Structures are given as C-alpha cells and as structure tokens.
Amino acid sequence: VCTDKKRHEAAVDALRSLMGKALRSTRGEAGPEELEEEPDMEAGWQSRGKGSALKRTTEVWAFIAKAAVKVFKASKVKGTDEEKSAAKTAVAEYIRDALFRLGPTFVKLGQVVSTRTDVLEKEYTDVLKDLQDNVPGFGGDKAKAIIEAELGKPIDQIFDSFDETPIAAASLGQVHRAVYKGKPVAIKVQRAGLKELFDTDLKNLKVLVKLLDKFDPKS
C-alpha cells in the first residue's frame, strides 16, 4: 500500500491516462503519436527499448484493446462466406503489422500463436505465419556497425570479406556471409537494443502477472 499521497496521486493519474488512451484507441480516436508507424522498424524497436515502461505499457494495452474489439467485430460481420473471411483477414493483417511494430517479444508471441490452428481460425494463422518467414532485415551498414561496436575493431580487420546483404533475417537478428582467415563463415548479427526492449517487456509482464494473481490466484 502506498502511503505517500503525492506518489499515489501520480500513479492514479498515470493509470487514468493509460486507460483513456486505450479506450480512445479502440474507438479510433487515438492521436497520431499513439498510432504512429515508423518507416524504420529497427529504429522503432530501439526507441521503444529506451523509452519509459509506462509508455510501453500504454502502447501494449492500447493494441490489445483495439485488437480485441476488431476481432469481435469481425466475428459479427454478416454476408457471404467470402465477406466474412475478408473481414477476419483484414483484422489479422492489422494484428500482424502491430506485432511487427511492437518488437521481438511480440513477434515471437505471434510466431507461437500462428501455429495454434486448434485455437485460431484459418484467416488468422495464415496471415500470422508472415511473422515466421517475412521478418524484415536491417541494412548491411548497420550490421557492420553492430559488429564493430561489439568487437572494437573495423570490420576489415576482423574478416577477410563481409557480405552486407543478409542471407536470412529473423526477429532477433540476421545472418551474413563472411570470410574469416580464409574460411567461409556465417555470421549472426543480433539486432541492436534488444536487451533494453526485452527488459521493458518483462517488467510489464511481471506487473500483469501480479495483477492477475490479485484478481484470480489460479490464473
């Protein structure tokens, strides 16, 4: 129990703001900053990792609320089977794109959910499979910068050659071809800022678990 009146009031105000943003988002009234899409997904993930836990919580719960409303509305669409399927596919695409923006934690969640054909309808699993196969990569220059920062040397002092074009990309990183001491090797480069982003998400998940435990210890 918080006995500091000022801290209590600040927490209440923050919670009220969070709930308001989530509700406005479900009605399509959120401001540009609440629904902003970054042209550079990688930069968006990094900025989220460096942001405040409260802002991250607002973003996550606003998405959950809006997605839930969209899924419910799609389930109530009347018309032909094709029209009903199209409505569900549109919602699935919204969820897929939002999970990409939210970052690796939620991309991983989407990858797991996309395999649950026993729980989700085909329209949702088909679209969410993109999270397994179509995660965008990042530039070769950025990959080289990450390696140089990690190893403390210019890339040409580490490898005989380094191919800037990735051969595969995933939520946690991507793979590049290189030649090291005359031998061809595959180099996996981890995306920058993942630790900060995971730390923020884990804090939010811990808060969620505590809240669920208070309402229902069995959950």
Image: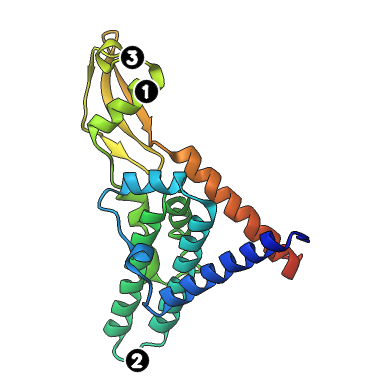
> Label 2 vs label 1: CA separation?
55 Å
Tag 2: Cα neighbours inside 10 Å, few (<14), some, or many (≥20)? few
In depth, the one of 164 and 119 nearer the eye is 164
Which disc is residue 66 wearing? none
* Disc with the residue nearer the chain's start (2 vs 1): 2
Report the colour scheme: rainbow
Q: In the drawing, does residue 205 fall left or right of residue 55? A: right
Q: Quadrant of the N terminus?
A: bottom right
Which residue is tagged 2?
Answer: 78
Q: Secondary structure at mark 3?
A: loop
* Disc with the residue nearer the chain's start (3 vs 2): 2
Residue 66, horizontal then vertical, whole percent? 43, 73
Residue 98, horizontal then vertical, whole percent? 37, 61
Q: Quadrant of the C terminus?
A: bottom right
| Image vertical order of residue 110 relative to residue 70, above or below | above
In depth, the one of 103 and 122 nearer the eye is 103
**Amino acid type, residue under disc 2 in the picture:** Lys
> Label 3 vs label 2: CA separation?
61 Å
Which residue is tagged 3?
Answer: 153
Which residue is tagged 1?
Answer: 149
Callouts 1 and 3 close, C-beta under 8 Å: no
